[in-house]
Amino acid sequence: MIKINETLAELGFEEKEIEVYLAAIEKVPISILELARKTKIKRTSIYNFLDHMIESGLIEKMVVGKRTLYAAAHPKDLPRFLERKMELLSSIIPDLSMLYGKSGSVKPKIRFYEGIEAIKNIYSDIIAKDMEGQLMLYYSNFEEEYKAFSNYFIEVFTERRIERKVRVQGIMSSSAYAEKHTQKNKRELRESITLPAEEFPIYSTVIIYNNKIAIISFGDERVGIVVESKHIADTQRSIFNLAWHGLLVRKKGKKE
């Protein structure tokens, strides 16, 4: 239960909202009196934030006869709560972007991410709305990614990327994890070239998208750096394309 509370708190739930939600999820539907009894929170206090939970979709209000009861959202519907937050955030991004770097500086923007939770922000950026229909390039060692991220996180990221129609071209070290992904290339909008790990080891993940290049080191370091610069990103695209076409020629020569 501690794990659940901590995770919900990280997702933006307030402490009392978590208590009310967990109480409501044990019995559907439930009265305000029962919620107060189970959580030991005064009814008047619950009313202070209950409307917000209803608006957010965490709790549903219903009238049964003369009674007003409440039902917790099903756990599988919780991602919609986060999607609403993302929609609200997306609606103000254009205005925030106008304020960002208003001083007129054209220097590359560099951001540093330390720890797996921070690195996840890079992956969220890759499937942001402005990436819809775009092409992402990467060098990767899938084995290290799977050790760092949960299968659930990778699956959700991949599905959201597919929804955004973000196509990928990737050069990766051979491994069981790389093999798993190449088998799903068509469905997952991916083209890939796998290199022998012993001949061409790839220790870090490099992702080129929009005007950004992300360099992520998993393993013990678990740090990420994102450089936002059109010139740097375009240069890295050229280098990637050079490697990509060279590897295709190499592959074709081996077949012949």
Image (tube, rainbow, N blue to C red):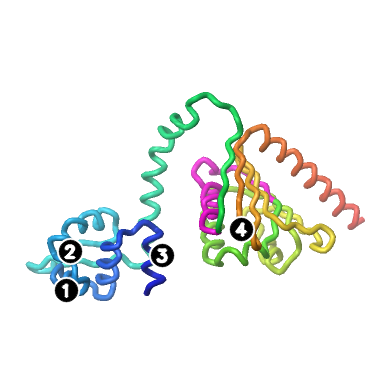
Q: Amino acid at mark 1?
A: Arg
* Disc 3: which residue: 7
Q: Secondary structure at mark 2?
A: strand
Sequence order check, earlier mark of 1 and 3: 3
Mark 3–mark 2 contact, CB under 8 Å? no
Cα separation, mark 3 vs mark 2, equals 28 Å
Q: Earlier in the sequence, mark 3 or mark 2?
A: 3
Q: Position of residue 215 (x, y in %)?
A: 65, 49
Q: Quadrant of residue 35?
A: bottom left
Q: Label 1, on which residue?
A: 37
| N-terminal-most mark, 3 or 4 | 3
Q: Which numbered disc flags the more N-terminal residue, 2 or 4? A: 2
- Image x and y of residue 211, in percent: 61, 37
**x then y, percent, for residue 24:** 25, 70
Q: CA distance from mark 3 to mark 4?
A: 20 Å
SS type, badge 3: helix
Q: Is residue 167 visible?
A: yes
In 3D space, how far apart are the residues under numbered discs 2 and 1 (Cα atoms)? Answer: 20 Å
Q: Secondary structure at mark 1?
A: helix
Cα separation, mark 4 vs mark 1, equals 44 Å
Amino acid type, label 3: Thr
Q: How many marks?
A: 4
**Which residue carries the number 2 mark?**
62
Outermost residue, right direction? 256
The residue stretch that appears in magenta: 116-138
**Can you say which quadrant of the picture contains the C terminus?**
bottom right
Relative to 105, is 27 on the left or the right?
Answer: left
Looking at numbered disc 4 in the image, what kind of residue is underneath it? Answer: Arg
